Image (spheres, rainbow, N blue to C red):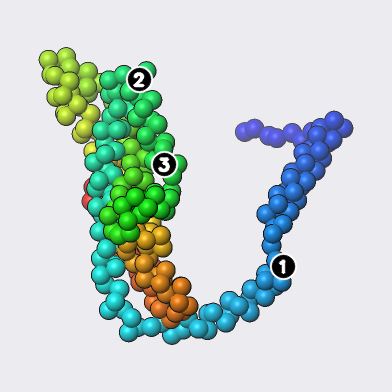
Amino acid sequence: MTTTTWHKRTSSANLAVFTGWALALAFVSWAFQVMTQDTIWAFVSDAPAQFADIGSRMLPPAWGFINELWLPLWETLNIATLGTLIGTAIAIPVAFLAARNTTPSVRFVRPVALLAIVASRSINSLIWALLLVAILGPGVLAGIIAIALRSVGFIGKLIYEAIEEIDPAQTEALASTGASPAQVMAWGVVPQIAPTLAGVSVFRWDINIRESTVLGLVGAGGIGVKLEAALGTLAWPKVTLLLLVILATVIVSEWVTAQVRRKLI
């Protein structure tokens, strides 16, 4: 059994600790001043009253508005599902090109594939949607492509890491029997990463459900269009209903994801 022996700090150690805390507090103070330099504190002090006022206007929800939400909700589910499918279809070959043990060229092809993955992960879905709405016009198509482009980086990164972590003994055994590279890939690599691919794809679909609910705020279709319209007209009872519908959709997607992952993994 080991015992911890207490030792008194030296003067230089105490000075270093004090200096570290002083610098940390100074940095936090400076950061707070930068973040709040444009803050109007009269609005902040009035925020509880404004919150209570808007909260009172949001109740009860406009239940009669529910029939106008089924089609936008269906569009949202399509955006998330089709975007995930397209993103997965693109991410799989990109992942194989990015993995060290399957890429045809570590020096040339792998950096390009990694750049594609990083670029996809660096740009938020809303930014993709803004760009695509400007190019394609408003609508569901822009939302689907935005979700797909965002999904490529997420799925591609996790899949190429899974490819690099496979057991090489299986692929070597297949190669020693005279199997072609395509056969080694199909029977030695794919079965090892299949559970990861299934789990990651379902998990990304769950994330995309959340992200697709707000793409309509920039004109990319889905239930977000209704939310933006309700906020723009200060129709607070409709906003409440929309938030409840979005919450219910996310809860259902969580349940579906959990059930699918339990079956697949």
Measure the alpha-carbon separation of dots 2 and 3. Answer: 21 Å
**How far across and how far down the image is residue 210, in percent?**
38, 59
Tags 2 and 3 touching, CB below 8 Å: no
Question: For this view, does 31 lie left or right of residue 170?
Answer: right
- Picture mark count: 3
Q: Earlier in the sequence, mark 1 or mark 3?
A: 1
Which residue is under mark 2?
108
Q: Residue at x 16, y 29 (%)?
A: 186
Which residue is the site of mark 3?
121
Foreground residue among 224 and 52: 224
Q: Which element carries disc 1, helix, strand or loop?
A: helix
User: Disc 1, disc 2: CB below 8 Å?
Assistant: no
**Front position in the image: 263 or 201:** 201
Q: Earlier in the sequence, mark 1 or mark 2?
A: 1
Relative placement, left or right, of 189 versus 14 is: left
Q: Residues within 10 Å of mark 2 (few under 14, many from 20)?
A: few
Judge whether 47 appears above or below 221 on screen.
Answer: below
Question: Dot 1 corresponds to which residue?
Answer: 41
Q: Position of residue 86 (x, y in %)?
A: 25, 46
- Amino acid under disc 3: Arg
Label 2 residue SS: loop
Rendered position, 21 above or below 225:
above
Asked which secondary structure carries label 3, the reply is helix
Quadrant where the N terminus is found in the figure = top right
